[in-house]
Image (cartoon, helix red, strand yellow):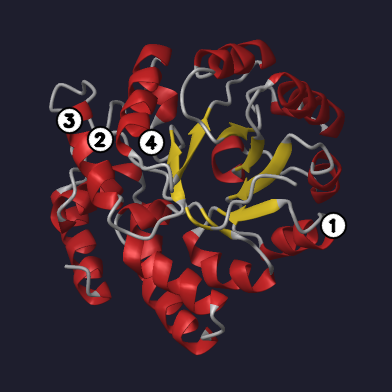
């Protein structure tokens, strides 16, 4: 039986100070505040965590902080995908002694014309054979420009150490096709807040939602309403979540999520360059959508 992943796993931001150095003290404060919510766990070093801007040493410090602060009742999923198989395996080995429940591995994509199904199959199977912890496939065409075939996901899902997929495509046809082809114990997680409700209805087990950094309870409520069959209530909350997700995630991205965190009582702080903080105009737009959602 594969590790069960059900519920909400926010991909937590990585705090920096004004010099853009890691701010582990504020990371710890954020984690302890998130622990008060009924979250299933956390995704560490994901896209929302600006993992592509962190060194391996910084990444280890971030994982150490989560290990120290997260109770055993919540799972820790760590992003470890690199462009080469060798570097992905090296990073996984560096995390070997830490409390990691699963690794989130994005599709390599720099040489995307060569990233056909056979290449990706070989990549994920070799990681799965070597890793001492289970693997979750991270499908994020928005950043990679790479659309994986659902048939490949279904084939990879048969490996005992490949336990799920985080699908951030927002494509419900693709999501449906995956759910149709995989077994019940394969964890399909939604990575797009815009289709959270719909994805859960289609059979997804939970979500890894960037917007949940700012609105954890709203996302938890959608999940729990769907699980308990209160579909009208869940639908109403999804419609409430949609404009917030559109502004913070789809329109302005990480800088806006961090700004919103500062507004709602968490520590957001600056993004790391080359990302820039949100402008004054963008700040007003973010404040307005937070007020309209009832969070501010």
Which mark is drawn over residue 181? 1
User: At x 31% / y 62%, what residue is drawn?
Assistant: 215
Where on the picture, by quarter, is residue 136? top right
| Disc with the residue nearer the chain's start (3 vs 1) | 3
Residue 169 seen anywhere in this rendered image of the structure:
yes
Where on the picture, by quarter, is residue 273? top left
| Disc with the residue nearer the chain's start (4 vs 2) | 4
Where disc 4 sits, the SS reads: loop
Q: CA distance from mark 1 to mark 2?
A: 42 Å
Where disc 1 sits, the SS reads: helix
Where disc 2 sits, the SS reads: loop
| Disc with the residue nearer the chain's start (1 vs 2) | 1
User: At x 36% / y 43%, what residue is drawn?
Assistant: 71
User: Does residue 78 sit above or below 184 in this rendering?
Assistant: above
Q: CA distance from mark 4 to mark 1?
A: 31 Å
Residue highlighted by disc 3:
25
Q: Residues within 10 Å of mark 4 (few under 14, many from 20)?
A: many
Residue highlighted by disc 2:
276
Q: Position of residue 239 (x, y in %)?
A: 43, 78
Q: CA distance from mark 3 to mark 1?
A: 44 Å
Contact, CB < 8 Å: mark 1 with mark 2?
no
Total tally of numbered discs in the picture: 4
């Amino acid at each position: 039986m594969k590790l069960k992943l059900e519920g909400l796993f926010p991909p937590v931001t990585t705090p920096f100070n004004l010099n853009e150095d890691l701010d582990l003290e504020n990371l710890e404060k954020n984690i302890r505040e998130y622990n008060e919510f009924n979250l299933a766990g956390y995704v560490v070093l994901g896209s929302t965590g600006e993992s592509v801007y962190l060194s391996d040493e910084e990444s280890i410090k971030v994982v150490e902080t989560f290990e120290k602060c997260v109770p055993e009742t919540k799972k820790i999923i760590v992003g470890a995908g690199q462009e080469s198989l060798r570097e992905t395996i090296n990073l996984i080995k560096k995390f070997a002694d830490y409390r990691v429940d699963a690794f989130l591995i994005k599709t390599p994509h720099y040489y995307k014309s060569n990233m056909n199904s056979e290449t990706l199959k070989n990549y994920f199977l070799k990681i799965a054979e070597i890793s001492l912890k289970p693997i979750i496939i991270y499908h994020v065409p928005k950043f990679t420009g790479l659309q994986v075939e659902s048939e490949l996901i279904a084939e990879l899902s048969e490996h005992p150490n490949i336990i799920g997929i985080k699908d951030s495509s927002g494509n419900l046809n693709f999501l449906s096709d995956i759910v149709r082809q995989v077994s019940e114990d394969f964890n399909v997680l939604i990575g797009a807040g815009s289709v959270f409700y719909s994805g859960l209805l289609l059979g997804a087990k939970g979500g890894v939602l960037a917007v949940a950094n700012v609105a954890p309870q709203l996302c938890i409520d959608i999940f729990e309403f769907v699980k308990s069959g209160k579909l009208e209530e869940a639908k109403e909350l999804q419609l409430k979540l949609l404009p917030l997700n559109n502004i913070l995630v789809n329109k302005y991205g990480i800088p806006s999520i961090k700004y919103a965190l500062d507004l709602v009582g968490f520590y957001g702080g600056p993004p790391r360059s080359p990302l820039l903080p949100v402008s004054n105009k963008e700040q007003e737009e973010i404040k307005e959508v937070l007020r309209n959602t009832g969070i501010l």
